[in-house]
Image (tube, coloured by chain):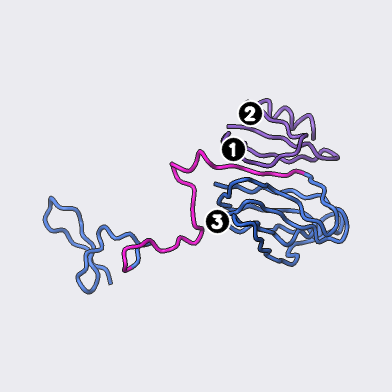
Chain colours: A purple, B blue
Amino acid sequence: MMYVVVPGDNGGYQTHVGPDHVIDDLSLPDKAEMFDNPSDFSNRLSEIS
Amino acid sequence: MVQSYRDSPSVLRRDVDADGRDLTNLNLLETDDGSIAGWPFGRALDQNSFSDRTEHAGNVVSVNADSFHEIFSKANAVFVLGGVIYGNQPSSVRYTWDDGTTDIIYTSPAGGDDSNSDISSPLFVEPAEGVKKLEFKNNAGASRDYGYRVTTL
């Protein structure tokens, strides 16, 4: 399972959560941040928002 | 009319229709030629597919006026299970198919007023097979922030 955060403006963000082979197939911007651990993912979202 | 009976106490109950056809093992999605009739949503989550479920979400995503926002873009097509977009007049969900062509589902606002007097509308993302890219459009006439959650298989 992979967790992706794409930080936006003013506390906004986009996320993609799915199996590795699906996430690897996505077109993601350079600023996309990848996490293996769901708690790291949640912590990052808390930092942004 | 369907009638039920047991061949004997040791046999499972059988269901037969008015013409005596045995419906006991009938797959209700099976057509007369033995093929499976189209399930309205094409695919659904099951025990085998659950691990492929992928979620694409946006929280307070800023979208310029009359612009499309990309929910996801992939090299290989997926099945869109469904989703919801929420905000001020989201519209025009655009599906890019496996062959690169596109189709747009146009919608009109169907919501209520929020504290900013904007019309906040939930927009349902309809299930679709063979989708490589999914987008929606800001139809509010000015930059707005949106939220969404879409799942794919």
Chain label for disc 3: B
Q: Position of residue B144 (x, y in %)?
A: 84, 52
Q: Position of residue A20 (x, y in %)?
A: 58, 34
Q: Relative to B104, does residue B10 appear above or below in the rendering?
A: above
Who's the residue at 58% across and 39% down the image?
A22
The answer to which of B138 and B112 lies nearer the viewer is B138
Chain label for disc 2: A
Who's the residue at 73% across and 53% down the image?
B86
Real-space Cα distance between discs 2 and 3? 29 Å
The residue indicated by pointer 3 is: B129
Who's the residue at 79% across and 46% down the image?
B61
Real-space Cα distance between discs 3 and 1? 18 Å
Amino acid, disc 2: Pro
Q: Relative to B13, does residue A45 appear above or below in the rendering?
A: above
Real-space Cα distance between discs 2 and 1? 11 Å
Instruction: Give, as a single range, the part of the protein colored magenta.
Output: B32-59
Q: Quadrant of the N terminus of chain A?
A: top right
Is residue B12 left or right of B78 when viewed as pictured?
left
Amino acid, disc 3: Glu
Q: Examine the residues drawn in magenta and state their main secondary structure.
A: loop
Q: Relative to B71, does residue B37 appear above or below in the rendering?
A: below
Q: Nearer the viewer, mark 2 or mark 3?
A: 3
CB-based contact (under 8 Å), mark 2 and mark 1: no
Q: Is residue B122 magenta?
A: no
Q: Callout 3: helix, strand or loop? A: strand
The residue indicated by pointer 2 is: A38
Residue A18 disc label:
1
Asked if both marks, 2 and 3, belong to the same chain, the answer given is no
- Circle 1 packing at 10 Å, graded few (<14), some (14-19), many (20+), is many
Q: Callout 1: helix, strand or loop? A: strand
Can you tell which quarter of the image residue A37 is in? top right
